[in-house]
Amino acid sequence: MTPPMPNPTGASSEALLEAMQAPPPAAGALSFRMFLASVLAAAATVVAVELLTDLQKDRIVSLLMLAFGAVVVMIVLTSMLIRKSRHAIALANALARQNDQLAQTTRLLGDAQRIGRLGHWVTDPSGEFAVWSDELFEIAGLEPVDQVAFAKMLDIIHPEDVGAYVRARDRSRATGCAFIQELRFVTPNGQVRWVRIEANASDEADGVFRERFGIVQDITERKLAEINADQARLLLMDAIESLTNGFVLFDKDDRFVMSNTMFREMFPAWTVLMKPGISFTELMRRAYEHGLIRSKGDRFEEWLARKTAWHLGGSRMIEHRELNGRWIQSVDHRISDGGTVCLVTDITAFKTVQAELEQKLAYVEAIRSDLEQQTQELEARGAELRAARDAAEAANRAKSDFLAIMSHEIRTPLSGMVGMVDLLRGTSLSEEQKRYTALAKESADLLLEVINDILDFSKLEAGRLQSECIDFDVPNLVESAVSFMGEKARRRGLDLKVSLAPGLPQYLEGDPTRIRQVMLNLVGNAIKFTEQGSIEVRASHRQLDGGVVDLRIEVIDTGIGMSPEILAQIFDPFVQADTSISRKYGGSGLGLAICRQLCTIMGGSIGVDSELGRGSRFWFETKCRCGEALALPAETVVASVDRPLDILVAEDSPIIATLIQSLLVKQGFRPTMVVNGAEAIAAISDKVYDLVLMDVQMPEMDGISATKAIRQLPGPERCVPIIALTANALVGQRETYLAAGMNDYVTKPIQPPLLFAAIRRWALPQYADAPPLQAGGNGQLEMFVS
Amino acid sequence: MIAAHDQPLLDQDQLDLLRAALDPGALRAMLAQLPAAAADALAAITAALAAGDLDGARKAAHVLKGSCSSLGAARLAEIARDIELDRATTAEMAACLPLLSETIEATADALSRVVERA
């Protein structure tokens, strides 16, 4: 029993050991081998126990031994299983960790590619397909697929870049050197992207390089920036080239960088020397050696030091003359990077023009001084002329003054003669005497008219007449002037009519007296020089700025007319159409000159259109302002009175008496009329009157005496208010009336509003500004005078 | 007569005042009387002058002045004023008479139109 024992036992132990120690390459195969080893070990143990115990015969013992062996096997197997499963779990954990790390690395790689706009590809062994990274699809604008054919790559490359790409790729494949190229992709939506493709060289196999790996980077932004920079540089170069100045650039180390064509054309000899990189001082030395510059007396090195300092100082303009005679203007500018720009201009043409201009300027200057001299001479002459003119004007004024005086001296006695002739004609005369006196009268009248004209004219000449400015009724003025001449026209059988333009203002402000005078003169002339036909007076106006109105009056006749020669001087003084006319028609020849003077002082003008034998059209214009309706306060005065006043009126002139009576009756008063002072006293003693209107100058008893008498009466009637009616409104006379005991006075012409106002003031206390009337003259006098 | 020449024949303002204060008929009647009254005054002045009565002539002129000015006969009034106040001798006054006569005629003419219009 013993000898075989160790073998099986040893064998099974070894097997078990081996099983225990075996590495776990594959879990299934391992478990099976371990299980087999366990069963074999259990069986060997049972056999060994049977041999050792010799209890083969004892079945129960045998069975027990067998069970024990089975239990041992189970225990061993169980422990082995536990150990195996622990090992498997550890392995699984390690694997999961590794997977996580890998995923993170992959993710980081993807992020890095996305951020860097960089993708990669790996070519398959055939070289016809490639596997792309996600970012590469993003760059190409394609949907991700597993494999991308080489043909597809050719599709997305810009058509202009395809040829270069293929050639570079083929060369790389042939030689195995690295492939680097920048080209454009066109994405499916038409966008162009610049990319940089870079591939490593790969190992050679069978004489062909394969297994290529490479990256594609999106460099669109950088590329566009480069293109822009290129364009900017080109633009700058164009600008520099298009300068009309010569342009030279030195860098911060004062080395020549570039010049433009203009400079090169201006200085071909210099251009030969100006190689990029040559320093300014070196360039100057070379130019000196070539005789392009001179050092102007100094030693060259000293000159060069100065020149260089000046050049580096920058920004000063100098003009100098080249050896070839051209004028050059140059200026050096320091630029921001420390370099220097020299701008050079050929100003030869400018200098020529400048020289010409200077010459012309000198010429103009000479002319100017000539003119100044002439001006001075003219001024001196002007002063002489002014003096002469002043003297002439003074003489003219003296003449006018003399004329005015003389006219008075002539006219006064002449007037006396005329008057005496008239008186003489009123006496009983023989027929012969009557004829003589009629002729004397006619001649004297004519002479008087002439003298009147001369006097008017000399007053105008002497500037003694001034224009006045009052409101007037335009149609009324024209019509009254015309009607004044109506009788004269009728006597000559002429039709004289007025036509007022539509829209003619009713009221203007101006000088109606002068306008009337001119109008009368013109109409008088028209009548004088028209044998038959008609005369028309037209009035119109023109509105000017600032409320000014030009009033135009025309007098149109069908008379003899005038020739142009006469027209030219018709408004000059002492001119008549001709002497025969003067003889035939008479007159001083001053009428139109007077009219012109009158129009001038009214700020207007006068003129005439005429044709010999066809009549004349005289016109004049005067500057007026818009006028206002004439004050007619009668409207307010006519207001009703409280009661019919009894008024005594003492007035000797029948016509004034009638006028006053009519005015008072119309006002609702009750007038009693008497014709002198005595009657007035009698009337006042007879009846109570509210008021007395007393003419101052009456026959038999004048107003002053009557008033004094009334104030002396014994009864209350002596207190009646008395208003003087007088044509004499002088201050001294007024006081005489008041001293006589009159309360107030009204001057003639009797203006109804003033008359009514005076009546109300004294007869109706509610109108009185003063306290109620008191007896006695002095108090009233003071009251009135104040 | 410068002053007279400067005066309009008729004083339109005065006539307007009269028109406003009187019935047209009454005014017409008065204006129609004026030439005759003026002629009377002229006769009175001439007579006074003929008699050498300077004062009488002045008084007649004064009356004429008052009535003419009140009825708007401005130039007549001015001539009357001239005779009354500015003429010192009969000769000077007589010198005014032709003009006075002429003006009466002219005024009558002008007034007849005013009367027609009134």
Image (tube, coloured by chain):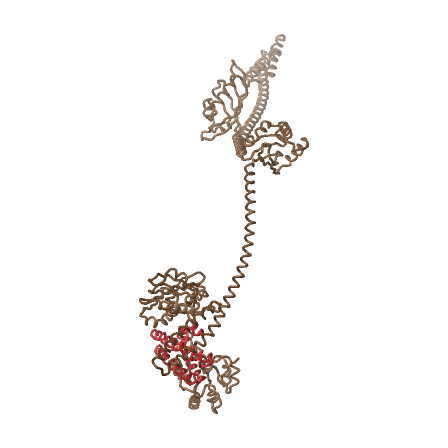
Chain colours: A brown, B red
Left or right for A746, reference A482: right
Who is closer to the viewer here, A540 or A69? Answer: A540
Who is closer to the viewer here, A664 or A302? Answer: A302
Extreme residue toward the front, this view: A432
Q: Residue at 54% across / 53% down in the picture? A: A375
Who is closer to the viewer here, A64 or A176? Answer: A176
Classify A512 as above or below A250: below
Residue A473 figure quarter: bottom left
Extreme residue toward the bottom, this view: A714
Who is closer to the viewer here, A619 or A106? Answer: A619
The answer, for residue B49, to whether it is visible in the render is yes
Classify A129 as above or below A362: above
Extreme residue toward the top, this view: A3
Residue A414 figure quarter: bottom left
The quadrant the N terminus of chain A occupies is top right
Q: Exactly how many numbered labels are in the figure?
A: 0
Q: Position of residue A251 (x, y in %)?
A: 61, 31
Q: Position of residue A370 (x, y in %)?
A: 55, 49
The answer, for residue A625, to whether it is visible in the render is no
Classify A740 as above or below A610: below
Q: Position of residue A723 (x, y in %)?
A: 46, 83
Residue A437 figure quarter: bottom left
Q: Residue at 63% across / 37% down in the picture? A: A314
Classify A657 as above or below A542: below
Q: Position of residue A577 (x, y in %)?
A: 38, 64
